[in-house]
Image (cartoon, rainbow, N blue to C red):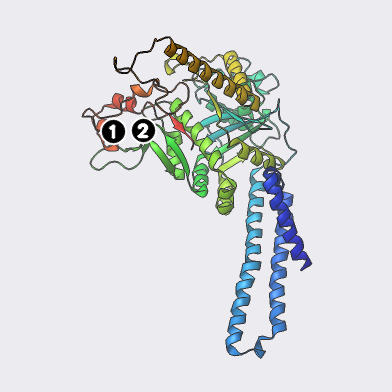
Amino acid sequence: MTVTLTCWALIIIGLVVALINRGTVIEVLAKPVIQLILVIVLLLLAAGWMLMFINTLLIIRPRLLTPAMRGVVAASTVVLMVLTGGVLGYGAFILNTGRDTIQNVFASGPSMDPVDGRYNILLMGGDAGAGRTGLRPDSMAVVSIDAKSGRTAMISIPRNLQNAPFPKDSPLHDVYPRGFDCGDECIINALYPTVEADHADLYPGKANPGAEAMMDAATGITGIDVQAYVVIDMDGFSTFIDAMGGVTVESGGWVPYNAKKWPGTLVNTHWFSPGTKKFTGKQALWFARSRDFTTDYHRIRRQQCLQQAMINQFKPSTVLTRFSDIMSAGEDLLETDIPQSQLGSFLNLANKAGKNPFKRLTLGAPDFGTTSDRFSTFPDYSQIHTRVDGLLEEATDAGARAAADKKSAAAAKKKSASADKSASGETKSASAAPTKPATDAKSAVPEAIEGNTDPTAVPSTQPDGSPITEKYLVQLEINGQRTLISEIAANNNECSAP
């Protein structure tokens, strides 16, 4: 009884602390040592409760009871044993599953210290099955997280970026003193397999030389110290989203994906329509990777959106109800050198990060000119460093306050100017002549990422005025009207996380 009361007291204390400072509870419970202690405690409690019920039966002596009462007592005892020992045992199993996943996925070693108040992590996505030789990351982004507020900046690196520089302390600096430069073959996503095949010896003792090289390149590209990497396997990514119960996004345009051929045709293109979409893992993977009829930069925007949506929806309630599936998917999802000891604080930061939109920058179109400018082929790294520094300033509490103050000042100035204009009689009455609405083209549509396609330039109806449909798009492809399809799909980079 004393043990039970003590456990209940600890649970109540834990709940009180969670209400006051949930981050502390998350950090403590994420530690493998704490999880092991809890597993042992839960198993002992489960065994203790079961022994108590068995002992109670012996004291009651069921054979002395009437036949009817024997059945009632036996059934009640079994139910109580399941509700106590069974639940406690299952809790121990769940905790041990999470503990095994953490130990198998995350590295050992001390925690990282933030650099200039931020944690900088390189995310890479690719088809990374068993034996990673030849892996070419399909997507790359540096995620920079404010160590206090969790405010996050995401810097997306196009896979075709060239001439990536290396910091002087990188072992690759001597190999590529002018950057990763050997013509069109030396785009950034070729660095991973190149190092794995030819320069793995430059990273002695490292489990993943290719990823280490990509971190060095990301540091040179962005001008910030990249401290850790996460390699996400795309098949594992699909499984993980299914384990979460799907992911919801607001899609702004038509997004193509490949499936079975339409009957009687050679066309296998299918389409996600604009609007609110709850994707399965497979659908989310298509949404993130599709670039048919558009460009790499369109899918980079959708990947950014999907990542934000996953952070927003990865809540404690989701983890608790789907813990076993999420942990099982986690082992197949990623490889990382983030230390186990860091996991608790990072989960806490992830919880904070989901409360604010990410600041985003793509190192190419549309943030650096247009596709025809070929910024990724001839990048200006000094310009990139300046833009990244500005982005990180925005991704802080102080930066957010400054942006809010600036927005308020602009709104007040606009309101004052409108009032002055009205007072001076410069406005025309509505009866004198029809006027345009006060809102401009941008204010008439949901807020979009800077550089997106002008929504008024994207066809929204068929020639007869009827809405665009998947059937219509398929017929256009059958007719060979690919240019028109590209025009219709031009805004499929517009996306937001609910």
Could you say which disc has been placed on residue 458 in the image?
A: none
Residue 65: image location, x then y, percent: 64, 89
Confirm or deny contact between disc 2 and disc 1 (CB under 8 A). yes
Above or below: residue 230 compared with residue 491:
below
Residue 151: image location, x then y, percent: 62, 31
The Cα–Cα distance between marks 2 and 1, rounded to whole angstroms, is 9 Å
For this orientation, the residue located farthest to the left is 464
Q: Which residue is mark 1?
A: 468
Secondary structure beneath dot 2 equals loop
Could you say which disc has been placed on residue 254 in the image?
A: 2
Mark 2 neighbour density, 10 Å: few (under 14) some (14–19) many (20 or more): many
| Type of amino acid at the residue the image marks with label 1 | Ile
For this orientation, the residue located farthest to the right is 2
Secondary structure beneath dot 1 equals loop
Q: Earlier in the sequence, mark 2 or mark 1?
A: 2
Q: What residue is at 45 percent from the left and 38 percent from the top?
A: 249
The image quadrant of residue 120 is top right
Report the side of 201 relative to 156 (left or right): right
Above or below: residue 102 compared with residue 405:
below
For the residue pair 426 and 11, the one nearer the viewer reads as 426
